[in-house]
Structures are given as C-alpha cells and as structure tokens.
Amino acid sequence: MKRWSWPRAIRVNRTDKVLALCVSFLVGLLVARLHVWLPGWFVILLGILAVSLLKHSIFHLGLLILFGLSLGIWRGAGYLQTLAPYQEFALQKVTLQAKVSLDAVYGNKGQLSFEVKKVHVTSPRAVDVPGTIKVSGYGEFAVYRGDIVEVTGKLYPTRGGKQATMSYAQVKRIGSEQTWVDNFRRNFVAGMQTALPEPAASFGLGLVIGQRNTLPYAIAQAFLMVGLTHIIAVSGYNLTILVNAARRLFEKRSKFVMVACAAGLITFFLLITGASASIVRAAVVSGLGLAAWYYGRPVRPLVLILLAAALTTYATPTYFWSDIGWWLSILAFFGILVIAPQITARLFKKRSAPMLVQVAIETLCAELMTIPLVMFIFGQVSLIGLLANVLIALFIPLAMLLSFIAGMAGMLVPLLAGWFAWPAKILLTYMLDTAVMLSRVPHVFKTNAYLSAADMVLCYGLVLLLLYGLYKRRSTWYEKLQPNMTDKVY
C-alpha cells in the first residue's frame, strides 16, 4: 500500500514567501480599520503551524498568507483600542504630560509650537496614549527636545502623521529627560547659526538634521513650488549618502568595519533627527540592505521595500493608515529602486550612466510614483521639479558635508567659524538662489489640480503596466534564428 505524502509539485522560493507574508500583513492592517478583531491565541496557532509545515511549500505559502493576514488584523485592532481616548476626549479640555520631541519655535500669534510623544493624559481620567500631538500655546519662553511638559487645553483630533493638535494651550515645563544627543543637537544648531547667516543656516540644518521649522516661509514656499521640499526633510536619500560615504572609506579595508561604521552613522542619524515615519522606513531599508550585502545575499528591491513597510507599520500602524509622509517615502523608494534601474539598463546597456543622467532618471521615477498621490491629497503639482532636482539635488552630498563642517566649527571654534563656513555659504547660497529663481518662472506650480480616486488608481495602473513592459524580455527577429546562424561571422 502506497503511503500518502504531502504534495510537493509547487515550489515557492524564500523571497516569494517573504513577499506574501508582508503583503498579507499590510492587507490585515487595512482590514483592521473595519474594526475586525481576532484573538491572540489564533495568531500564535497559525504561526506554529506555518513553522511546522516549513518543508511543504504548497501548504506553507497558504498558511503564511493566512498568518500574515491574521497578524495584521490582530495588531491593527489592538492599536486602534489604544487610540480610542483621542475620540473620547475630542473637543474636550484635557491635561496631559508628555515628552517634547521637537524644539519649539514661535508660531501663530506668538505661540510656542512643538510636538510631543509618550503622552500620559491626567485629566479627565488617567490613561497613556500613543502617537504624536502638535501643541501650540503659552506659558514658557522656550521648550527643547527632551523636556517634560504639562499641557492643558482643548484636544482636536486630526488626520495624517499627528493624532491630535492643541492650540492656545497652557504649557508648563515640569522636568527634563534630555540626553547627550539632545544637548549635541541643540549645540550644533547654535553652532550652525553662528557660522552661517540666514537663510543659509536654516537651510543647512534642514539638509543635515531635517530641522525645517526655522526656514523662512518664502524659502519654504519656493522649495514647494519647484518640487524640492524633500531635500529639507530627512529621508532615505540622506541615509544613502552616509552609507555610500562609509562604503568608499572602509569597503576595501574591512567589510565588518564598513558595516559597523554605516550602522553607527544610521543609528546616530536616527537619534539626532528624531524617528519620523520616512526616516524610520529609510533606516530599516538601509539596515536590511547592509545585512544582505554583508552576508552576500542578493536582495530583490521589492522584497526590501515591503519588508521595511511591514516592520515599520507593525511598530506604528498609523504610518500605514494615515501618514502621507510614509506613503510618499515608500512610493519614492519604489520608483528609485525598482523602476529607475530598469530604465537605466535599457538606455545604457554596455556602460554605466553619467551621474547627471542617473540623478535625472531617479528623480523622474520618484516623481512618477509620488505625483498621483500628491495631486489626490493636496491638489498641487510642480512642472519644473525635474529640472530643479537636476540643478540642485546633485550637490546635496557636498552641501551636507560642508554644512556639517560649518556647524561643528560654530560649536568648537566660534571665533574662526566664518573661515570654515565660507565653502558651505557659497554652495548653499547657490542652491537657495537657484530654487528661488526657478520658483519665479510663470506657471511652474499648479494648485487645485486634484485627481479623483479613480484617476489616481488609473495612473498607478499605467505605471505598473510600464514596469511590466520594462521587466518583460523582448525577443528580436535575430534571436529566433538557429544558434549556429547567429554565431556565424560574415
């Protein structure tokens, strides 16, 4: 009698399993928004079954999909419960204690404006809530990152990366949990402002540590009009520059030293800039890429992006639900890592692309992926973004280095800071003047250019169709001939 065995006809490789797990988890998070709930024991049971049937691919893939879906539902439903107090206290006067995550600046009507995390509501009832709240109010002359504050005011729920806002609140500093990183950041900001004049100092701070709340409104608006806002918001591009710098310095000496140095730079960059959605996602992608390179494992870009998306959204599901910055970061990375290499390979089959052309292709692909969502949400688009990025983005690595030197000189040798800062001043002035000049070209920035949801989906469908055409191998007439005929020399 023949013994029955599990079917083994269908084989699925490891990366396909990772893709299936990540996609199903993200779908589960989406389903959780419908207030679907699953018990934790069910998720654990599916995980055990998925591990126990590891060798049987046809069943293992299905179990992985089911496990990822249930894990996403369980995680999303649990996180929704922790966010419930925001709806409970909506439009009520509340008192809370929280840790400041962003240095305060003076905003509307002289209010101190800053962001807080690790929120503990003390009134009308005591409860801890996750997420970030933007606060504007009075009561203190200055508030810095790491300070513990008590805030009293009306709570307004909001959409996007912030869970709520408070305006005209009473702010009282009650303590501090500042670390050496917070002190370094504050001293570096002071050093940059000592070494460089405005607006070059604020622009340099935006490039190096992502601080853009001190940038003059006119400059910020000019960057928005020419599609350069991303260069003053820390993102994956900044981390790519740091990783490439570490690779050039240490790759020929030691792989371990190179990876350790790059990981240290990524960690320090995360600490000094703050854990925003885009930079956390970029750090995860960079870390996974470094690990794969160190162990000699090829990584499919799509796997890298989706794995980073799943890991970051497991930690903070609101990234997936409502953080536009996170979505734009994911879409831009998809364009740069998935679409741009295919276009470059088609245009430059036997040689590497020039740096200027490579920047243009990557910028075009990033904008191709982000513009439909930007038009759907904000109804605005820049018609000169590609040219602006080619003229300015090429100098960002050098500008970051020179700005860092200027800031450190302002910290350590303020009397001589001007001598160390003049190269940064020249380059930053060129970048600022170019952005302002391009923003004054008539009709380069369109507003009220909204896309409907159907149009946005159609745009991304066309992009996927383009991607399919790029990946599909096109055979030509001479490839269909007999091998001996194609090898014959005439």
Image: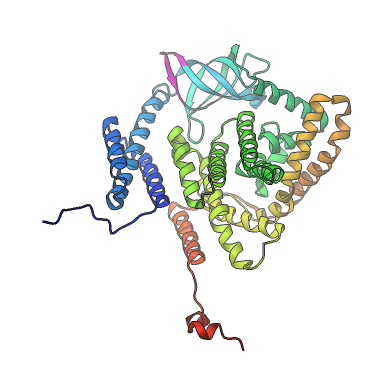
Residue 312, compared with residue 437, is above or below; it is: above
Q: From the viewer's perspective, is 142 left or right of 481?
A: right
Q: Is the magenta stretch mostly helix, strand or loop?
A: strand
Q: Residue at x 27, y 49 (%)?
A: 59
Q: Residue at x 50, y 62 (%)?
A: 467
Of residue 441 and residue 386, the one placed in the foreground of this image is 386
Which quarter of the rendered picture does the C terminus lie within?
bottom right
Q: Is residue 129 magenta?
A: yes
Start-end of magenta stretch = 121-130
Q: Is residue 394 magenta?
A: no
Of residue 256 and residue 420, the one placed in the foreground of this image is 256
Of residue 441 and residue 470, the one placed in the foreground of this image is 470
Q: Which residue is drawn at 80% across and 44% down?
A: 427
Residue 62: % across, % down: 29, 49
Res. 316 in view? no
Residue 183 quadrant: top right
